Image (spheres, rainbow, N blue to C red):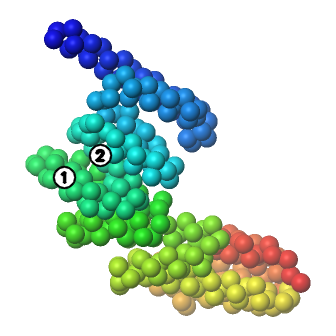
Amino acid sequence: MLNFWKNSKSNREESDLLVRKALALAVMEGTAKPRGNYDEKQYFDLLEQAISICPDNSEPYWMIINSLHIRGADEKAFEYFSKMPNQKIYDFDMIDTIPAIIGMLVSVGKEEIAYNYLNGVLYEFSSEGKEQQKDLFLSFLKFEIPFHSLEYGQKIFEMLKRIDPTLTIGCDEKFGATAKWLFNHGKATEALTYLEGVLIFLPGNPLLLSLEKEIRHDIADDTMWNSLKSDDDFLRYLFRRLAHRFHPDLVTDEKDRAEKEKIMKEINRAYSDRALQKLKDIAERHAPQWKKYLHKEQP
């Protein structure tokens, strides 16, 4: 019996050593190279060896599952999850491990198992003195939303709402982040479609409605900018846009009036001189979001 205990202890220690080597590989090479660009085969081989030496060691399983989930290989991650002999998660692992597990389970259609994990962790963190861990865990879980589909994000949102609607606070920012990413990568129409989908289950959300309005305006603006046929058309339209934005009579905060008056004088002078390039320079300094239109060649 004593020899069995010693062998088990030795196997666990060897397994833990391989886990640390895999972690060091990911951290050291991952920081020296572009993110995640380390020797993945060696990383997974080390973790597989750790499992074979001590199958009861859950740590290499969780590391493999997390890595596969990040890469979108959730079906493969679920295979590892299903064959784990020990699915115990220690308190110190819950904050950053459980969100990936929940994400993996949601992705493979196991929402009820994911819900039970979520409920269990929130119960664990409900005791006095664990508020900070709970907030950090929820932050990690909500951080999953921008990196996946709308359907995925909605399922995370609905699970949180089912437990306690107040847990969904901040989800709108994550959905908004996804829409902004699409918008900033030249996918305004996709961003609008995404937001319209989110507003079905988050109706009337002021942050998302404001973002939707901004994107709709940009799509219309894009159409208008691209319809300009000559330098004269461009000059007149750019002048009107700048005047609308910087005219001192349109300020909502009187503290801004002096600055707006100064900019408006520059605008008027450039327009009076028919100096299109000067107007473009003014716009580039004070309205950088128009930059993509300012250097477009006119037909």
Task: Look at 37% across and 22% down and name the residue there.
Answer: 53
N-term-proximal mark, 1 vs 2 = 2
Give the residue number, with chain letter if any, for mark 2: 95
Disc sitting over residue 30 in the figure: none
Element under label 2? helix
Residue at the location (42% across, 70% down)?
A: 151
Residue at position x 27%, y 13% in the image: 7
* Quadrant of image for the C terminus: bottom right
Secondary structure category for the residue under label 1 = helix
Regarding residue 142, the answer to whether it shows in the image is no
**Circle 1 residues within 10 Å: few <14, some 14–19, many ≥20:** few
Separation (CA) of disc 1 from disc 2: 12 Å
Using residue 86 as the reference point, say whether residue 280 is left or right of it: right
Question: Which quadrant is home to the N terminus?
Answer: top left
Amino acid on which the number 1 mark rests in the picture = Gly
Image vertical order of residue 6 relative to residue 111, above or below: above
Measuring from the top left, give residue 168's x and y in whole percent: 28, 67
Residue under label 1 = 120
